[in-house]
Each structure stands twice: as structure tokens, then as C-alpha cells.
Image (cartoon, grey):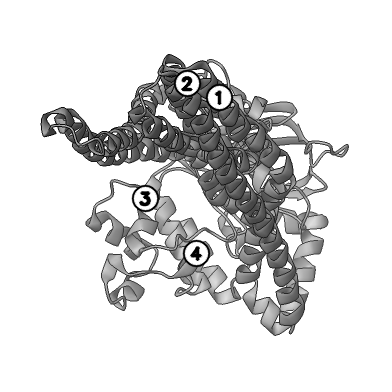
Amino acid sequence: MKTLFRLIHFTLPLWKEMLLALLLSVITVACAVGLMGTSAYLISYAALQPSIAYLQVAIVGVRFFGISRGVFRYLERLASHSVNLRLLAEFRIWLYRKLERLVPAIVQERRGGDLLSLLTADIDTLENLFVRIISPPITAFFVTMGMFFFLWSLGNYPAWIYLIGVFIGGVILPAGTYVTSRRAGREYIHVRAELTSRLVSTIQSTGEILLFGIQEPQMERISSISRGFGNAQMALARVNGFGSGATTWIVNLTVLGVLAASIPLVREGSMSGVLLAVVTLMTAASFEAILPLTLTTQFLTPVLTAGRRMFAIADAAPQVNEPAHPAILPVASGIEINGLSFRYPDSPEFVLNRVELSLPQGKKIAIVGPSGSGKSTLVNVLTRSWDYSEGSITFGGIELKTLDSKDVYSRIGILAQSPVILTDTLRRNLQIGDPDAKDGDLLRSLENVELGAWYKTLPQGLDTWLGDRGVKMSGGERQRLAIARLDLRNVPVHIYDEPTANLDAITEKQIFDLVMKREHGGSIIWVTHRLVNLEQVDEIIFLEHGRILERGTQTQLLALGGRFAEFYEIQNSWLD
């Protein structure tokens, strides 16, 4: 129940809207009960053929309750769905903010499809929180109490029989439904997440699947998961069907019981015979508030399971601890690294070991080394994706750990090996760098990265759709677009993490020359394992096993004849 209480906590800011929706729900059912009662009274009393004057109140009552029921039902739906949609928005925003703190660790540990299922399907499941879980029991309680006291005013036995029927149909049966549907409900959520994850990974790997001819095994896995998902849905449907049928029996038995208990009261003269039909039909109508309780318990398990999945991720400890009182971001942007050591959680070995590095403003350096030497890890630590365990990093003379991550991001721009191109227009992709950039700024940025000729071929200019993750662009065009986006940010430190790893030699040189000739007045960190075109940087840092083995210009390192020269000769011999 801890999960349920945490979910309910999200509803507290909406208590006014919820109270209105609950009030409208109670009034709607009360109008339905009133409609049945006045209708029964009108028909029963009319059978005695009284003067029409005696029927006027009942006639007006039927009209009033009939119209009011439709109006209040409509208003109740508006109010409850407003609460629902606002709750879903709150859940998504809250979870996204939690996920922001966990990047990149959460991305490395979980499949993208699982996160997608969490942000979409699981959150959508939580739409049942108010409409299916919170509202029905409260509405049922007030309607039951009202009906009970009405029957009590006519006679004890009908009231107690009604209460027993409500207890069986509103408590015992839903409790049994909850117990029998728990396993199917949990299975439904977990299998749905697995199915989403598998489908996403299959779509993303379609090329490889076709190339290696493994369509059949892949489809069999998806079919197997789909069958499991269908079985879970069928199990829930069976429980729902049984609950609906059993509830109908309980309603009918309760109505018959109230009727049987009321007949002696009519014979004794303590109840008017006209009220016999009124009591019977009002009892039946009041169960409109009890019927949803079976669905409440059936939806409870999926909602709790989705909530647990959401909280399990949201409660994970972030890899970067934000300072309680962040230091003021300095004007200067020079970076100094002293004795930096870092290791990933649960790993005994240091990925970075006693790293020393100086990057004054305006300096261009290259960090090179074999795969696994710690280059990308150093970039992640510099951008506060991970917190370092030993040593010091200062940014403009201020310790990096004392700065807010958002302040650090406002001074550092990074271009990754595979830059993210949004499935959107060219304009939207460029505006990631500067959301307020005008069309003229966007076009200048494209010219600066030599994409002017490419831009002129686009059918809709800046509003051209770039396809799924920029599929309509070549690798070089995507990298240039990412550089243009980075330049639009106008930050003092640019980090390029293996930006040319997947490009041919000619395009690689074009990209490198383009970056080096760009004058933005800041510093450049070029991270690569390819030892080409490095004569243009001010200093080369050679990393291996997390340690800086050599440093200097390309000429100095080649003359040294160490590890850099060895790697340089190997790569150039391959090119020859």
C-alpha cells in the first residue's frame, strides 16, 4: 500500500478539482436513484387513479431528475477527465525530471524500449488512479450511506439487508477479484514492457536482422511475448467477466431481499403500498455506485505495478550529487584537472588514474589513445555526467562539484560520435542550439559549416522534414548539422568526442579542418583514437589505461618515439 499512498500524494495539489468531481459523481448517482424512485412512485400512485394534482410533484420530479442526471454526468466526466489528464501530465513531467538526474547511468543500464514503455504505457495505466481507484469507493460510500438511512427511516430489516448486499457486492467480491487478478495484473504490465522493448529493438535493428537472415527467430520471440501478453489480457478479462456476472446476481438478490423485507411492513401498515416499488427500484438504482468497485480492484494491481516500476527508477540514487548551495558560475572558462581519479560504481578498477590537465581559454587540445583508455569517461566527468571520486576539477577557478550541472552545461557544448538528430524538421534540429535563433542565424550557421549548397536542395527549406533520426542525411551532413547546432549555443568550451569515427578519410579531414578554423574564442577538446590531422592542435594528450603517458605537440611526440609514435606508425602503415 506504500505505492498507493505515494501515488495518491500526487493528487493532493488537485484536491479542489477532485472534490468537485467526487461531488458531481455522488449527485449523478443520486439523480439516478431519485429518477427511479419518483418514476416508481408516479406509476404506482397513478394506478390508484388520484386527481392529477396529486401527481404534479412526482411528474416534475421525474423531469428534474431525468434532465439533471444527464447534465451532472456530463459535468462529472469533464471534471474527472480534467483531473486525469493533469495527473498524467504531472507524472510524466516528474518522471522525466527524475530521469534527467540519472543520465547517462540509466541509459546504460536499461533498454530504450523499457524506458519508452515506462514513459508511455505505464504512465497511461496510471490514468485509472482517480477514475477507477479513488473516485468509485468514495462515491459508493456516500451513496450507500444515503440509501441506508432512507431505508432505515422506513424499516430496519430492508436497511440491513441492503447493507449486507452492498457489503458482499462492494467489499467481499472486489476483494476476491483483487486476489485472483493480482498475478495476471502484474504479468500484464511486465509482459507489455517486454513486448514494447522487443519491438523497439527489432525496428531499430531491422537492417541487421534482414542482413543476417534471422527474421524467423526474431518473429518467433515477438510472437511468444505477444502470446504471453494476450494470455495476461485474457486472464484479466475472465476475472472481469466473473465479477460482472457475480455483481449482477448480488444486485438482484439484494433487490429481492429488500422487497421481501418490505412486504411485511406494508401489511403492518408501517409502510405505504405505493412505496413498495419505490424502495425496490431505488435499491436497484443505488447499485450503480457499487458496480465499478469490482473494476477498481481489478485495475488496482496494474496501477500499483506501474507505480512500482516508476518509483523504482525515480528512487535510484543519481550519479551526480548537486550542491545544496551552488557556487556562482565564474566569468572565466579555463579548466584545470589535478590528480583526477574515477571508477564506475561497483567496479574495483580506476578508469581514470591521477590525470593532470590544463585547458586555458582558447587552447585546442586532442585527447587520444586506444579504445578503452578512458577518453569518453574523461568527457563524461568533465560534463558532470558522473562525479569523480578523487582529485579536483576547477572551472574558471571554481571546483566543478560546487557548480550546478545546468550552469556547467551552459558553458560546455559537446558533439558525440553519433549526434542525435531529432525526427523533426531542420529548423527544430538547429534550434536545439538556440531556441530563440531567427531564420537568418540558422542559415548563417549552415553556411559556416559548408551546408549552404545542401540547404538549397531542400524542398521546404528550414521546414524540411529530416526523417527518422536524420535518415535522409549522409553521415558527414549529420556531423556538420551537429556542429552548426553546437556553434549556435555560443559556449566557451567545445568538446568533440570521436566525431569522425564513422566517416571516410576525406570527410573526416573536412570536418576536422572545419572545427579547427572556426573562431568562437573558446577552447576545443578533440577526443579521438585516430591519429590524423593532429598537427593543428596546441597539445596532444595520450591516454592509456586511464593514465596520461605522453603529452606535447605531434612533432614532439613523434620525436619522442614512445607509445604515440608507435600507434601513429601502425595507423599510417594501414593507410599505406
The disc, 4 or 2, on the residue closer to the chain's N-terminal end is 2
Query: Are the two marked residues, 3 and 2, in contact with CB atoms closer than 8 angstroms?
Result: no
The residue where tag 4 is placed is 479
The disc, 4 or 1, on the residue closer to the chain's N-terminal end is 1
In-front residue for pair 571/44: 44
The residues tagged by marks 2 and 1 sit, at their Cα atoms, a distance apart of: 7 Å
Mark toward the viewer: 4 or 2: 2
Query: Are the two marked residues, 2 and 1, in contact with CB atoms closer than 8 angstroms?
Result: yes
The amino acid marked with disc number 1 is Leu
Query: Are the two marked residues, 4 and 1, in contact with CB atoms closer than 8 angstroms?
Result: no
The disc, 2 or 1, on the residue closer to the chain's N-terminal end is 2
Residue density around tag 2, few if under 14, some if 14–19, many if 20 or more, within 10 Å: many
The residue where tag 3 is placed is 488
The amino acid marked with disc number 2 is Phe
Residue for point 52% across, 16% down = 156
The amino acid marked with disc number 3 is Leu
Residue 488 relative to residue 316: left or right: left
The residue where tag 2 is placed is 148
The residue where tag 1 is placed is 163
The residues tagged by marks 3 and 4 sit, at their Cα atoms, a distance apart of: 14 Å
The image quarter in which residue 418 lies: bottom right
